[in-house]
Image (spheres, rainbow, N blue to C red):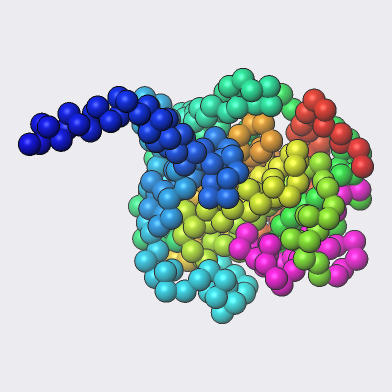
Amino acid sequence: MNRIRMRTFLEIIYNCPFILLVAFTSFIFVLFFDGEGNRRDVHEIAVSRLLDEGGMAEPVAENATGKNGEMIKNELKTNDAIGEKSVEETAQEDDTLQNAGVRRKENDKIENKYDRKTDMINLDMQGESGKMETHTTEFVEYVPIETNSRYYSDAGKVALTTVYDYVLENESYFNDAAFLGDSRTLGISDYAGLTGADFFCDNGMTIYKLLGDDGVTYQKTGEKVDMKEILQEKHYGKIYIMLGMNELGYGDTPMYLKQYLKVIRQIKEWQPGVIIYVMANLHVSREKNNMETEFNNININDKNVASARLANGTDVFYLDCNPLFTDDEGYLQAELTFDGVHLYAQHYDKWRDFLFAHGVEKDGNDTSQ
């Protein structure tokens, strides 16, 4: 009886190839399009699968491989308690990070365990020409240490600035640029001399609050504005984002990466053709590096490594200026900072020159305002 049923089923399939066509088309649609019918970016699909492999509850699929074809995983501990409260609710309870303190002496030499080796993630990207292009994100590996935090783990690698043939620019390059960030971005606004750029930043700003209803301060007027409205009403050629310091104790790193990916997707939808720069968070000094809390360079590096995965070398780039300001062990140099976290005003010129040296000129992209 079972054989007869199977034969009848195969005969139906053979005589009705339309069924196979519908099934195959449906599979392709689910794989490459989101729930609203929009085509999904190949790189974003790869990052989404990485999130899913890292233990995220909501899958947002595809493949990212490293050496020997192995899936690269963040291997982070999931914060089970986060499911009981949203990140926004937690942030409202403690809006300012106040957990810098004395560092455990036994961890003073952890950065000396670096085993410098380059790990490259190759992601196939489909360019505007329709041809498949290959871009790379490079990491320098080291021996990670055990962490007991529910917010982060030691990534075991340091992300490098996205490989690209950057162009040396000048101040006019930023006339159609917007900077989104926290107090470090506020320092760039005040002291880097990029007067043509728009700065939207606040002390305590996070990736979770950036597109929220509370708004962000527009530094040219000092008024709070709704970033959702700004990004839909005014077009920018470049957008620089630097967030992650105030998130060190809010949710775990996969949650941070998931929200960052969501923000970048939204910006790209509202700003067609924009170049997005994901900027690394600056490390803190040895004195501020507190292994008893979440306010430490291992956590900062974990966030930086996560956000670096969003870069694709076509319209999203990761920039890391830490080598300009940190010592051989990765600490922010004490003589450059007044509080172990923020730079003295006179050192922002190095940051400005770093941004000048990493311009991206795309064919057909008008960088003038």
Magenta span includes 201 = yes
Q: Residue at 82% across / 32% down in the picture? A: 365
What span is in magenta?
196-223
User: Which SS does the magenta portion mostly show?
Assistant: loop
Q: Is residue 56 above or below residue 45?
A: below
Name of the residue lying farthest toward the bottom: 93
Q: Is residue 148 above or below residue 15?
A: below
Quadrant holding the C terminus: top right
Q: Is residue 308 above or below residue 213?
A: above
Q: Residue at 54% across / 46% down in the picture? A: 34
Q: Which percent across, then down, holds residue 175?
A: 90, 44
Name of the residue lying farthest toward the left: 1
Q: Residue at 24% across / 27% down in the picture? A: 11
Q: Is residue 315 left or right of residue 301?
A: right
Q: Is residue 297 visible?
A: no
Q: Is residue 30 left or right of residue 94?
A: left
Q: Is residue 298 above or below residue 156?
A: below
Q: Is residue 180 visible?
A: yes
Q: How many marks?
A: 0
Quarter assignment of residue 72: top left
Quadrant holding the N terminus: top left
Magenta span includes 165 = no
Q: Residue at 60% across / 57% down in the picture? A: 244
Q: Which percent across, then down, holds residue 191?
A: 85, 54
Quarter assignment of residue 182: bottom right
Q: Which percent across, then down, holds residue 334?
A: 66, 54
Q: Is residue 153 left or right of residue 303?
A: left
